[in-house]
Image (tube, grey):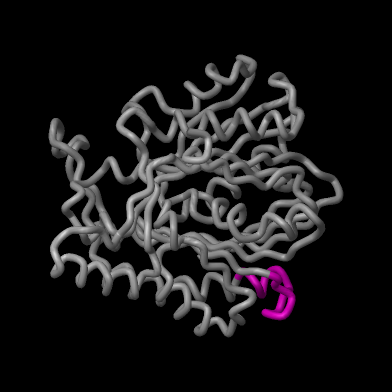
Amino acid sequence: MTITSVNKVSITGIVSVLPEISCENIDESSSSAREEMARIVASTGIRARRVASADQTALSLGKVACESLIDAMDWKPEEISLVVFVTQTPDYPLPGNAVQLQHQLGLSKDTIAYDVNLGCSGFVYGLWQVAQLVAGLSKGKALLVVGDTTTHQYRQDNRAVSSLFGDAVSAIAIEKCMESDEMVFSLGTDGAGAPYLIQPKGGALCPGESPELFMDGMQVFVFTLREVPSSITACLAAKGWQNADVDYCVMHQANEMMLKRLGDKLGLTHEQLVISMGEVGNTSSASIPLALGLSLSEPLLKGSVNLVLSGFGVGWSWGTVALTLTKLKVCQVIDLSLAQ
């Protein structure tokens, strides 16, 4: 794995958006189906998932998140130098979501804007890339947007995935901050895992076919237990932290049993380990910033918090960052069901 760091750049605000539709995993279907779903819920901890409507996309949800974030940060459009949109469910194969978002937000034509095709490791990779770029730009404010409408990518009767995945998008404000703490990253890739978490249809090899997400859950579990603990351990060592220095560890919110196994393997306490996917599901690259909003908004808005954030999944791809966040200006979850 690669260890790298970025100085004098910080996260200063986070806004996440949840679509209004909530789907319960244990519904009023046949008794045998309810029994099966009860076993899945007991294992994953996912009781319900948020589902985007047919006309909602990662881009439309991302626009809501960015507009709220820009307003809360009191940023002027001309101050924003960069927009990076991490998504596996763009509106179109081309153009990307980021360039459309630049126009919809009324940002300057000087704004750099592009997409990154990554899934559950995408928040950490996006943070690393945006932080590096912002450090070298004259205008030191950027938007990192992460998230997917994964529920549009499979049949609802495919219980292997339909009981797990939910939709959400997060927008993160990143800016130069001369007093900020160093961010330390640990990043890795193993493309041998490509066949085990894949959407084989609808791309260049199988054009014109409806997308259908495939996941081998056991292979995902084995990969995660193999790679993630060493990534977090290496990141902590490079940062010079012990477990006791960590206020909270927020890993990709894949499923509860997996996170508890990882926490035990790392020697983390229950108080340090954040688990928040129960009512929203696995929200891909948005899961870490969404978890920060759902579970840690109060401490993040009050003062300094030492965090370890780790994303992992499709690829295989994984990334961890150790950083201190100092009193965010905003840490909010917009629940569109409450706006109806």
Residue at 27% across / 74% down in the picture? 39
In this view, the residue in front, 66 or 310, is 66
Left or right: 112 in relation to 244: left
> For residue 103, which quarter of the picture?
top right
Q: Main secondary structure of the magenta part?
A: helix
In the image, residue 246 lies in the stretch drawn in magenta: yes
Which residue is most to the right?
179
Q: Position of residue 317 (x, y in %)?
A: 41, 58
In this view, the residue in front, 256 or 337, is 337
> For residue 274, which quarter of the picture?
bottom right
Residue at 18% across / 55% down in the picture? 158
Residue at 30% across / 60% down in the picture? 25
Left or right: 223 in relation to 263: left
Left or right: 169 in relation to 117: right
Position of residue 213 relative to residue 83, above or below, is below
User: How many labels sit on residues?
Assistant: 0
In this view, the residue in front, 248 or 281, is 281
Q: Position of residue 47 (x, y in %)?
A: 37, 63
Q: Position of residue 184 (x, y in %)?
A: 67, 61
Which residue is most to the front?
28
Q: Position of residue 219 (x, y in %)?
A: 27, 70
Task: Report the span colored magenta.
Answer: 235-247
In this view, the residue in front, 22 or 324, is 22
Position of residue 155 relative to residue 192, above or below, is above
Residue at 36% across / 69% down in the picture? 44
